[in-house]
Amino acid sequence: MSLVRKLTVFLAALALAFTVEKGVAYSQVITASASPSSQSTDRCLEIIEAFVAVEDPLEDLQNPVLRTKGEVKDWINFYSEVLACLDEWGTQGEYSTLTFAVEQFLVLIGGNDHEVDLVDLETSDDRAVVKLREEVGLPPPEGYVYVNHFPSLLDTPPIVLESFLDFHTLGVTLPCRFIVVLDEHGFTDKEKKLSKKTLPETISHELVHAYFQAMRCEGDELPKWFREGAAVYFSGGKEHSITYSEGGREVILVASTPEEYQEYQTVFRYLRSELGEEDFNATIRGAVEGNSIEEIFQKTDTDSFEELSKEAQDWKKAEDRQKKLRNAAIALAVFFGLGVLAVLKQAIFGD
């Protein structure tokens, strides 16, 4: 078979990769992938053959289940060769979707010169992960989640930069287990300092997304209010602030959860109060595993998120009123307590 014919056959197979039954395993060619400096024609044919033999290349690139640093290194070497071969044969434009996926994979798995934390959800002590694993009872997905750290927006590679078009975005989770966070974000040193203070919670928030997505990379039908509500609720969703002096006055810089996400968080707090801890955890687990929120509506006797949110807001108003009454009662008790002490002091010691 001529070189042109071979190339045509393999690139046709590449385009039909989703329907090809898994044949040549990555491990069969990974061992020869340590040095992608020289891309011979035969080697590229072998590499592409192994690539297209995978049943679903995009799934493997978006949701790689890797358990050791050695496996991660092997995959980086293998896909570096895949990209080099596609580059040599000038196929990026024709097969742009897969080429983009390979490029993004290599950046997000640590093939770029930046810090990447490999997080094992089975052993992580992150507060949100522990809650999902031990309280909600969701089996943690196998394999690493990749937390990519970039110093600032200016240091973010173009292939993920579009995820930060909203300037207030501090972290994102890309399909299906790749997290990108900015270690410092803002125009001023004070804003950057505040963003660093919120970084642990940002990572915790994104780990909730990665936990869910790694369980069900394709076909996630859970609505935004559930996904973001869970991420804010389990990661804490607290307000952070720093105080500094400027021009002889005290300035407080605050970083708070967006109003939309506060609404979602309130819904989760309401569900926890309404259902009780055990039923709440079982309901959340059922929604994620079943990829459906219908049980939530059934248990709260609601038909839509709007109706559920209204009930949650009414519950929050009542809770806030009760809190104000308790605080007022405490203040009144303290006031009268101080008054009694003053009378006793006068009676005992006089003026």
Image (cartoon, grey):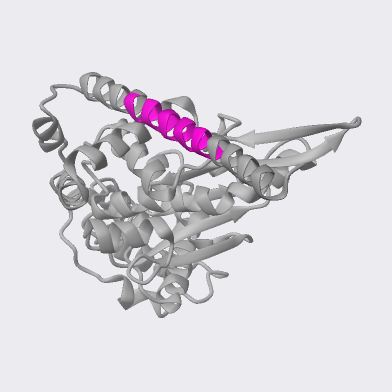
Report the quarter where the C terminus lies.
Answer: top right
Q: Nearer the viewer, residue 130 or 220?
A: 130
Give the residues drawn in magenta, as a range. 318-334
Apparent side of residue 133 relative to residue 120 in the rendered image (left or right): left
The percent coordinates of residue 350 (x first, y second) are: 73, 44
Task: Tell me if residue 171 comes above or below residue 335 in the rendering.
Answer: below
Q: Nearer the viewer, residue 31 or 162?
A: 162
Evaluate whether residue 232 shows in this view: yes
The quadrant holding residue 71 is bottom left
The percent coordinates of residue 163 (x first, y second) are: 51, 37
The percent coordinates of residue 228 (x first, y second) are: 37, 37
The percent coordinates of residue 83 (x first, y second) are: 47, 56
Q: Residue at x 30, y 63 (%)?
A: 49
Q: Residue at x 41, y 29 (%)?
A: 325
Q: Is residue 323 a member of the stretch shown in magenta?
A: yes
Q: Nearer the viewer, residue 329 or 139?
A: 329
Q: Residue furthest right?
A: 247
What is the chief secondary structure element of the magenta stretch?
helix
Q: How many marks?
A: 0
The quadrant holding residue 339 is top right
Apparent side of residue 67 relative to residue 206 in the rendered image (left or right): left
Task: Tell me if residue 214 comes above or below residue 272 in the rendering.
Answer: below
Q: Is residue 175 a member of the stretch shown in magenta?
A: no
Evaluate whether residue 95 shows in this view: no
Apparent side of residue 80 relative to residue 227 in the rendered image (left or right): right
Report the quarter where the N terminus lies.
Answer: bottom left
Q: Residue at x 53, y 75 (%)?
A: 35
Q: Residue at x 40, y 68 (%)?
A: 124
Q: Nearer the viewer, residue 104 or 287?
A: 287
